[in-house]
Amino acid sequence: MHNYRCFKGVFKWIALQLILLVSPFLIGQNIHFSQNYSAHLTLNPANTGRFNGDMRASSMYRSQGYQFSEAYNTFYLSFEKPFYVVNERINTGLYFSHDNSYGNSLPANLIYFNVSHEVLLTLNNSLIVGLQMGYVHKMVSLAETTFPDQYNREIGRFDPHLPTSEYFETTTSTHLDVGFGMLYSHSFIRGVWSMGISLQRLNRPSESFFGIESQLPVRSVMHGKADINVGSSMFVMPSFIFVKQGEPTQTIGGANIGYTLNNNSPKTLKNIILGMHYRNGLINDAHALIFSVGATYANVKFITSYDYDVSGLRTSNVRNASFEFSLMYTLPSTNLKKKIVSCERY
């Protein structure tokens, strides 16, 4: 009995240390879609409303490490709507994200509201300024985690339905985020290009798990993108993204190539695209090659992407690959505009 109590105490100490090691990882987590150009509201509040239409709705799903039993899953949903005040277009956007890593032990829910306004500098140049405010709720719960006394010898594995004498209190943390962003856009004969920067978590909020409080660093994002027509039917969309959160950095660079179909009917296939991007290969060691395929049908755009792990950090012969799927619907505009609004295909 004495040995069992010693083992139990040692196990609790080890489990607590593991949780404390995971907590900073949870604190540092942020949305990290490969299709950042589809989850554009997470990059920069100035991206809000950059489309020609009455409203736009987007959804995304990402599964990272889905080959393993406990994948890291992320769901994203956004809605954008422009309003006109004295002939000036004010763009509003709302997005929600749910992260779920290691089963249901590390869930996080985020909801943000964005607002932006575009100012024409010249006929072909514009500056967009955006503001962002969000509410973040994160939790650490071991309710669905198995412990040594839940090992079932009959089935040869741990059974979460068996009773356990172990108990860890669920801990939660909430905070508000405030962000700001700017984006410069230039239109030319063959298309448009833009560059932007955003500073998120400007209020430096704090998170607390298991009595350990940590102040979050400012999240800085720099990004650029172009939409260039090549000939009468082809187009190319190069893009790059640089994200810095404290010491960690992340980069994504690459391009999509598309083909426009000559269909006059509004309810038909409009274009198809293929793309390849490189994660963290521009500055740091390469992490993944990202392959994408997508199309636009009527007012609906969808893209599927696959992250192929090239980092060398894998278990046995299984790579830490990821899968993403995005869907976007744009309601055509019914307003007569008196100013130019930059339009992006994706």
Image (cartoon, grey):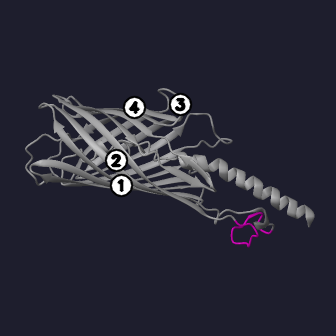
Whether pointer 1 and pointer 2 mark residues with C-beta atoms closer than 8 Å, the reply is yes
Q: CA–CA distance between discs 3 and 2? A: 25 Å
- Disc 2 target residue: 41
Return the mark for residue 286. Answer: 3
User: Which amino acid is tagged 4?
Assistant: Gly
User: Which amino acid is tagged 3?
Assistant: Ala
Mark nearer the N terminus (3 vs 2): 2
| Secondary element at image label 1 | strand
- Disc 1 target residue: 95
Q: Nearer the viewer, mark 4 or mark 2?
A: 2
Return the mark for residue 254. Answer: 4
Q: Residue 160 colored magenta?
A: yes
Q: Is 152 situated left or right of 293 in this image?
A: right
Q: CA–CA distance between discs 3 and 1? A: 30 Å
Q: Residue 182: give x, y in percent of width and height.
A: 29, 37
Specify few, some or many for label 4: CA neighbours under 10 Å numbering under 14, 14-19, or 20 or more.
Answer: some
Magenta stretch, residue numbers: 154-167
Specify few, some or many for label 3: CA neighbours under 10 Å numbering under 14, 14-19, or 20 or more.
Answer: some
Specify few, some or many for label 2: CA neighbours under 10 Å numbering under 14, 14-19, or 20 or more.
Answer: many
Work out whether 144 lies above or below 93. below
Q: State the residue at coordinates (79%, 66%).
A: 149
User: Which amino acid is tagged 2?
Assistant: Leu
| Secondary element at image label 2 | helix
